[in-house]
Amino acid sequence: MQDFDLGSKVNKNVTNATDTMNHDGELTMTVSPVCLVEGQKKAFVNFTDGKRNAEGEIPDCIIRKYNGFTEAEKVQLEEYMKANLTMLKKMAANIDILAAMMK
């Protein structure tokens, strides 16, 4: 199984981050908590700018669904996930689901 607990603690309240891509809108990224999918630990990474959206999966760093993004932008999102996999894993591993629900 893929190890999402990388030992380094990240702010447990971190549930999303933003990044700007090479287009006119701001792209928002959200990261899910770690889930078990068919016996493997995974987390989902969603990207949206309000008009377009894409759903990726880590640790595979693959965009599974996308709407409005070009194929080239899809590849850029996958490359972003690969380049930032350690950070994304830390974010997913440190999400406190109960604390998030209490907000």
Image (tube, rainbow, N blue to C red):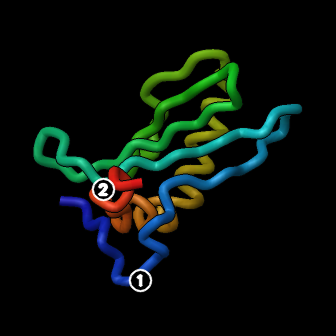
Residue 70 visible in this rendered orientation of the protein: no
* Image x and y of residue 3, in percent: 26, 67
The tag earlier along the polypeptide, 1 or 2, is: 1
- In the rendered image, the residue lying farthest to the top is 68
Q: Residue at x 61, y 55 (%)?
A: 17
Q: Find residue 12 and report its image quarter.
A: bottom left
Task: Look at mark 2 in the image and give the residue it sits on.
Answer: 97
* Image x and y of residue 84, in percent: 56, 60
Task: Please state which of residues 41 and 79 is positioned toward the viewer in this rendering.
Answer: 41
Is residue 97 left or right of 88 when viewed as pictured?
Answer: left
Q: Image quadrant for the N terminus?
A: bottom left
Q: Residue at x 88, y 32 (%)?
A: 24
Q: Image quadrant for the C terminus?
A: bottom left
Between circles 1 and 2, the one closer to the viewer is 2
User: What amino acid is at disc 2?
Assistant: Ile
- In the rendered image, the residue lying farthest to the right is 24
- Circle 1: element type: loop
* Image x and y of residue 83, in percent: 59, 59
- Circle 2: element type: helix
- In the rendered image, the residue lying farthest to the bottom is 8
Instruction: Tally the numbered discs.
Output: 2
Q: CA distance from mark 1 to mark 2?
A: 19 Å
Q: Residue at x 34, y 83 (%)?
A: 7
Q: Residue at x 78, y 42 (%)?
A: 21
Is residue 59 left or right of 52 when viewed as pictured?
Answer: left
Task: Please state which of residues 103 and 15 is positioned toward the viewer in this rendering.
Answer: 103
User: What amino acid is at disc 1?
Assistant: Ser
Task: Look at mark 1 in the image and give the residue it sits on.
Answer: 8
